[in-house]
Image (tube, grey):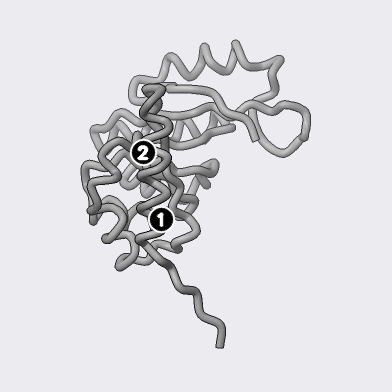
Amino acid sequence: MATLQIDTNIILDNIRKLNSFLGDYGIKWSIIMKVLGGNKTVLEKILNSPELENIHSIGDSHLSSLKNIKQIRPDAVTIYIKPPAMDQIKNVISYADISLNTSMRTIEALNEEAKRQNKKHKIIVMIELGELREGVVRDNLIEFYEKVFTLSNIEIIGIGSN
């Protein structure tokens, strides 16, 4: 049977190196944990290390992993790194401080749930750049932004592309 061995000391050493390099330029960065599969033992060792003090945020594509991260480090800023499904809106607001978004319908639902949970949810708007995968079409970007800015519990913190 195949097994995966995760050496958290090597991961932490890589985090130290990135912190040192990026810190020289005043850059805070995000660490994506999805390869760890939400494993609590591994997450606890990494999330409780002092190396994470200079990290801006922690991202994952699985809400169950973000839930584990919030249980271990409630103060951690978390990012849901894929566009939310409508049936997961409540969990996105519960476990992700930031999410990547492509749909006004989804953002409006996030806004309503954020109101219910008395939170301000931050989003990164994904823009379609021609590969026809996902995102707001560039021609519609200004109109899209104008609508999002009217939502009381949503804060746009950036744009992204795939």
Would residue 113 be seen by someone viewing this image from the given angle?
no
Residue placed most toward the observer, 69 or 156? 69
Q: Quadrant of residue 122?
A: top left
Left or right side of 128 for 102: left
First in sequence: mark 1 or mark 2?
A: 1
Residue ID at (37%, 49%): 91
Q: CA distance from mark 1 to mark 2?
A: 16 Å
Q: Secondary structure at mark 2?
A: strand
Q: Where residue 28 appears, x then y in whole percent?
A: 38, 30
Q: Quadrant of the C terminus?
A: top right
Residue highlighted by disc 1: 11
Left or right side of 118 for 3: right
Left or right side of 125 for 51: left
Residue ID at (44%, 29%): 123
Q: Is residue 138 above or below residue 59?
A: above
Residue ID at (36%, 42%): 78
Q: Is residue 6 above or below residue 134?
A: below
Q: Secondary structure at mark 1?
A: helix
Residue placed most toward the observer, 26 or 2? 26
**Mark number displayed over residue 57:** 2
Q: Is residue 133 above or below residue 27?
A: below
Tag 1 and tag 2, C-beta contact below 8 Å: no
Instruction: Say what amino acid the circle numbered 1 marks.
Output: Ile
Q: Quadrant of the N terminus?
A: bottom right
- Mark 1 or 2: the one toward you: 1
Would residue 132 be seen by someone viewing this image from the given angle?
yes
Q: Residues within 10 Å of mark 2 (few under 14, many from 20)?
A: some
